[in-house]
Image: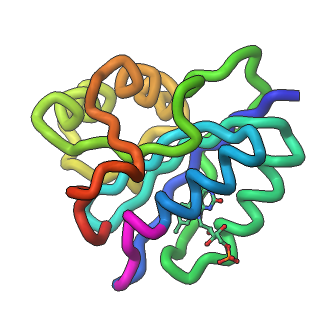
Amino acid sequence: MLNRLIYTSRASGDSSLQEILAVSIAWNRAHDLTGGLVCVEGIYLQYLEGQEEEIDRVFAMISRDRRHSGLKILERRVVQRRMFADWSMATLDWNDETRAIFQSFSPGQRIDLYGTDPTTAAPLFRAWVATPHWKTGAVTALSGTC
Ligand SMILES: Cc1cc2nc3c(=O)[nH]c(=O)nc-3n(C[C@H](O)[C@H](O)[C@H](O)COP(=O)(O)O)c2cc1C
């Protein structure tokens, strides 16, 4: 069954986004996983979707990764269809529009992705997915660390 998993975590010092993305794109493509990785001020917010056992497997790998800590699952559930049909993994450009979308789901709060409300995490990604602000690993100008 198709599952989605949304979690947040705290990046460790030397976490290269470019490297993470390159590995993720290769693995996810081979395992029919799709999703998006958002990284803002040392916090990761990742959306993953794929078959249940593939989600379990990749999340076990991700959980062991020393490049982040404090993993907190915001949502895990069965879904009927994918939200990210196009990318095995991409990162979101943090700009006025994507920041405003985050703020529209967390009114009055300071920007803290780690504090993302679990009940609005999926709608938040749905709003972000509709924007053109995603970058894949092919983009060389990807910012260095999270
Ligand atoms: C925030 C974050 C997100 C990641 N997302 C993925 C992913 O979607 N797919 C993937 O294969 N690896 C992902 N990784 C990398 C894995 O944790 C792991 O490094 C990779 O699968 C290679 O495993 P290995 O280092 O044990 O060979 C992610 C790592 C971090 C820190």
User: What residue is rendered at 10% in x and 34% in y?
Assistant: 96
Provide the residue span drawn in magenta. 14-19
145 lies above or below 114: below
Q: Position of residue 92 (x, y in %)?
A: 33, 42
Examine the rendering and report whether any part of residue 41 can be seen.
yes
Taking the image as shown, residue 138 lies to the left or right of residue 119, namely: left
Task: Give the image quadrant in which the ligand numbered 1 is located.
Answer: bottom right
Q: Quadrant of residue 71?
A: bottom right
User: Number of labelled discs?
Assistant: 0
28 lies above or below 117: below
Answer whether residue 138 is magenta in the image. no
Examine the rendering and report whether any part of residue 115 can be seen.
no
Q: Which of the image's four quarters has the N terminus?
A: top right
Nearer to us in this view, 66 or 7: 66
Q: Position of residue 8 (x, y in %)?
A: 50, 55
Q: Position of residue 116 (x, y in %)?
A: 42, 44
